[in-house]
Image: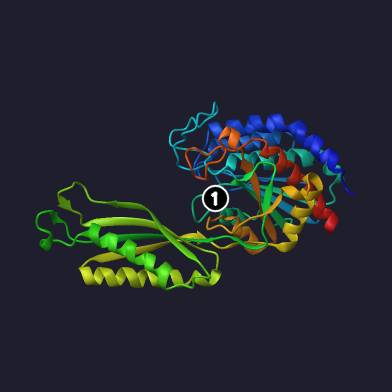
Amino acid sequence: MLIDKKEILLLTKELLPALVKLRRDLHRRPEVSNLEIRTTGLLKSELARHHIKMRRLRMKTGALAIINSESRPVIAIRTDIDALPVAECTRLPYRSQNDGVMHACGHDIHMAVVLGTVILLNRLRGKIPGCIKFIFQPAEESPPGGAKQMIKEGVLHKPDVDMIFGLHVDPMLDVGKIGLRNGPTMAAVYDIDITIIGRGGHAAAPHRTVDAVSVAAEVIESIQKIVSRETNPLKPIVITFGLICGGTVRNVIADRVHLSGTARTLDSENIPRIPALIKRTVDGICRARGAKYKIEYQSGYPVLSNDDTANGILKNAFTDLFGRKSLKTSPQSMGGEDFSFFLEEIPGAVFQLGVRNNKINANKPLHSPEFIADEKSIFYGTALMSYAVFKYFESL
């Protein structure tokens, strides 16, 4: 055995107060995708303070730390670092001080866990028979995502990474528990922008116009029939339009409406069908109503599919530390995660970290302005991630 689990638990407990303090600092000053300047600076400062080697990146934000850089084999651990354009509505004493920006998806918890893991493992580096890379990745929330940028930067090479672990908070899972699932776990994401182009005019004379608002409404309603009537119900697709912009005042018929939406599926075979089905629907409605249109497809994320072997290492590490009763099977989710790009390159897995605690109102969904995470989760996440690294090397 490379390490006694008691040593992992004691070191994690020792680090926890500092990690909670760091997490609150990150939560208080969140930054949106590709603008994580202060966040990156804080992370690098902490890594430098603990004398942890970093590799220079050409990217404006993000960081790469490395332990035992000359050793083999190589495992990587990744965290995302960006926040969301959400106005926080909690009463936390460390609530966001950046207007309209919030860590509503728990990336501040992720960063605290991974930073805690790198600090802990750096203390034990003499016992580690290999190399560990720590990827602090920007822009998970904004397709095409920061994972692709990091891969282009070569974070998986020199030396080549053999396996990668990640985590995501789960507000539906009680603190002290984790969730794992083999195979497809999170959905592929395919973002769509549609512009309906009509002919504006007076609200009292609709016959002289082409009402872009009514055409857009028909488009949205008809696209939902793609889901309910043109795809296999055993291979679900979700198409949601979360943004509609059009019109100026109540008595002017709009000449242009912009729709922004997202399509999600857990079946990779569905992905190439989505654009054709949407285009056919929009084209038919616009022709019938005398409107024109533009469709732009944004880069999305592939299906996140966890590797069985990687999941097995996480499972063994967690049950050894905390017992089998706290291990749950994660349900499949239509949420997307650009960690999936890493999994297209090398085997790995994401575990779901429980952050729910009804006593402190830590029970609101991800992306909610009222989202709260129980900070005890940092202890469980750090201990698990650190111990899983040793379990990985022992498995070879």
Q: Residue furthest top?
A: 93
- Vertical arrangement, residue 270 with respect to residue 305, above or below: below
Q: Quadrant of residue 153?
A: bottom right
Q: Quadrant of residue 108?
A: top right
Which image quarter is the C terminus in? bottom right
Q: Give the side of residue 280 with respect to residue 48, left or right.
A: left
The residue type indicated by label 1 comes to: Glu
Q: Residue at x 10, y 62 (%)?
A: 208
- Which type of secondary structure does the marked residue at label 1 adopt? loop
Residue 390, percent across and down? Answer: 82, 49
Q: Residue at x 22, y 66 (%)?
A: 291
- Number of disc labels: 1
Residue 163, percent across and down? Answer: 73, 58
- Vertical arrangement, residue 3 with respect to residue 15, above or below: below
Residue 178, percent across and down? Answer: 68, 48
Q: Can residue 68 be seen by looking at this rendering?
A: no
The residue wearing badge 1 is: 140
Colour setting: rainbow
Q: Give the side of residue 258 with respect to residue 126, left or right.
A: left
Residue 157, percent across and down? Answer: 69, 57
- Vertical arrangement, residue 76 with respect to residue 85, above or below: below
